[in-house]
Image (cartoon, rainbow, N blue to C red):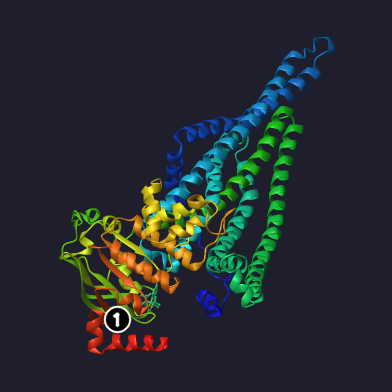
Amino acid sequence: MFEFLKSISAKNPNGRRGPEQPAVSVRERVSALRHLPAFLKLIWATSPRLALANIALRLVRAGLPLAQLYVARLLLDAIVHLTRLPAPERQLTPVLTLVALEFGLVLLTDALGRAVALLDSLLGDLFANQSSIRLMEHAARLDLDQFEDSTFYDKLERARRQTLSRTVLMSQVLSQGQDMVTLVLLAGGLVAFQPWLLGLLLLAVVPAFLGESHFNERSYSLSHSWTPERRELDYLRQTGASDETAKEVKIFGLSDFLITRFRELSDDFYRQNKSLVLRRAGWGTLFAAIGAAGYYGAYVYIIARTVAGSISLGQLTFLAGSFARLRGLLEGILSRFSSVADGALYLQDFFDFFALRPRIVRQELTGEKPLPFPRPIQQGFEFENVGFQYKNGTKWAIRNLRFKLQAGEKLALVGENGAGKTTLVKLLARLYDPTEGRILLDGHDLREYDPAELRQEIGVIFQDFVRFQLPAGQNLAVGRIDERHNQPRIETAAQQSLADTVIAKLPGGYDQMIGRRFNGGVDLSGGEWQKIALGRAYMRDAQLLILDEPTAALDARAEFEVFERFKELTQGKTAVLISHRFSTVRMADRILVIENGQFVEIGSHEELLAKGGRYAELFALQAAGYR
Ligand SMILES: Nc1ncnc2c1ncn2[C@@H]1O[C@H](COP(=O)(O)OP(=O)(O)OP(=O)(O)O)[C@@H](O)[C@H]1O
């Protein structure tokens, strides 16, 4: 495992990455903003009604600060005017009306603020749910080898992680629009009075913005460059504390090893992040002071004009208030601009992920109609000089493979560990396409058929089948999920795979949750799980059945029985069996021996024994073990 951990961080030659890495350039961040229209379109599509209501309320709210300042100005001027009148002429009604108006505006501002927050949260939740669903749907369309590519995996990880930050981004973008409207309205008032005050305002705010965007860039770079390590941290956290690993972690005394590695990585990240946060706080304080100085400069000027009598007290309040609000707004808009740009950078991962296209697709998508799948299969499958190399592998997993799998035949695959048996099966199911050569089905390249239809006609149970944390019945039904409510069919499949005796012992029978992840779940032994997994093959009405060592954990009697039944139940169907037990292998019509991904020999048990080749040698080896 240490090698594995090292290999994860090998992408990172110093073992560390941090702010020393080149930061994301300003151009990259600005260019990431191009994703915003597409993002807003997605939000709109989530719920046009909620989005429209949100925008309308925000527009009304955007005008309220100006209205409030204006009413405050009228109020102050009215009070000053009153105080100058002789006592008997002082009428309070106009002043009280203005107070009532201001009060009304405050109430409205608050109510609209809450309504907008509510709409944001509803829209955000809907958007988060829908994007998670889209993410799962898209992931399901992609090819297996895309999942095995670590760059892809990091992309998926970031796209998935940032569900929450995307809803924050949505609020930010909408608030940005709202604040910009307020800004234009308030700036209009300030410009009418003294245009250069606007210049002073910018001077007070721009340094803070530049500082903010600089630190945001750093922060993004840090978090981005730490994606592989974060993945490792998650892995360590899970390995150190999960039911699946607890047994081996205890037995091998791995917890210190795991914790040390976790501590090393997390401390490192903490240190780098802390230094960034500290610098950010220091500079932030300085920039805030510059901003305050700008504000007070303008304030002094406005006071001087009031004292000189060129503007009223009401105007002073309005202008000083406008300036203060504008400063706050501008600061907010500019700093939010960097977090919006940040969020938009993350959007890049999101859209990149959706831009990935599977290569194993229906030909129809590439302009041709797929061939109808033969029912029944007439001739069978033929491997024509097939070679396959895993993307992340250095050698050929399979090379120059030629053989025929006849319709209705039971073929066993024999070979040592890593010989390429599972790879061959994955190629048959088109989880991958051959790197060279072709696989034919009834004389046509497998790629000419619809991959979805092909997979429907193939039932594969892999050695590393999934132990779904689902009730027993549904665990079988995953073999044909649209039949999950067909209890008789599930029970028949259970009888055929011998899972019925396992289920009979469960307190909840077919409804018993299995696996330990959820409350009340009951775990099964390896062999019991295998019987359940085998049942999935019988749930399927497939023409080609593949069992890739799904019986390794069964006891000898159960395995014998399973294969006897398998032979009986798959009469007339084509089947491929992978097993290291020769007692099983010999039941097959023919046996294909492969070594290092290459064809060695093919024939029936008797033929191969008589030939005295590799098969005979392996058989003798195993038989000797029993003597
Ligand atoms: N996803 C993968 N990425 C890269 N290499 C792989 C991958 N899966 C398998 N390999 C490599 O391909 C070769 C063939 O592997 P395969 O799983 O087909 O062997 P096998 O005959 O089924 O072995 P076993 O009997 O141990 O199950 C091996 O060298 C293996 O390391």
The image quarter containing residue 413 is bottom left
The image quarter containing residue 616 is bottom left
- Expressed as whole percent of the image width and height from the top left, the position of residue 283 reads 68, 59
Q: Quadrant of ligand 1?
A: bottom left
Q: Amino acid at mark 1?
A: Ile
Q: Is residue 70 visible?
A: no
- Expressed as whole percent of the image width and height from the top left, the position of residue 530 reads 44, 65
Total marks placed:
1
User: Which residue: 25% across, 53% down?
Assistant: 365
User: Which residue: 49% across, 36% down?
Assistant: 51
Q: Quadrant of the N terminus?
A: bottom right
- Expressed as whole percent of the image width and height from the top left, the position of residue 551 reads 41, 70
Q: Nearer the viewer, residue 597 or 416?
A: 416
Please say if 335 is above or below 265.
above
- Expressed as whole percent of the image width and height from the top left, the position of residue 484 reads 40, 48
Q: Residue furthest right?
A: 87
The image quarter containing residue 449 is bottom left
* Residue linked to disc 1: 594
Q: Nearer the viewer, residue 345 or 336?
A: 345
User: Which residue: 32% across, 61% down?
Assistant: 459
Q: Nearer the viewer, residue 530 or 237?
A: 530
User: Which residue: 63% across, 32% down?
Assistant: 65
Please say if 114 is above or below 415.
above
Please say if 253 is above or below 23.
below
**Would residue 469 appear left or right of 297 to someone viewing this image?**
left
Identify the element where label 1 is drawn: strand
**Would residue 433 appear left or right of 51 to someone viewing this image?**
left
Q: Nearer the viewer, residue 470 or 123?
A: 470
Say if disc 1 is inside 8 Å of ligand 1: yes
Dot 1 crowding, Cα within 10 Å, few <14, some 14–19, many 20+: many
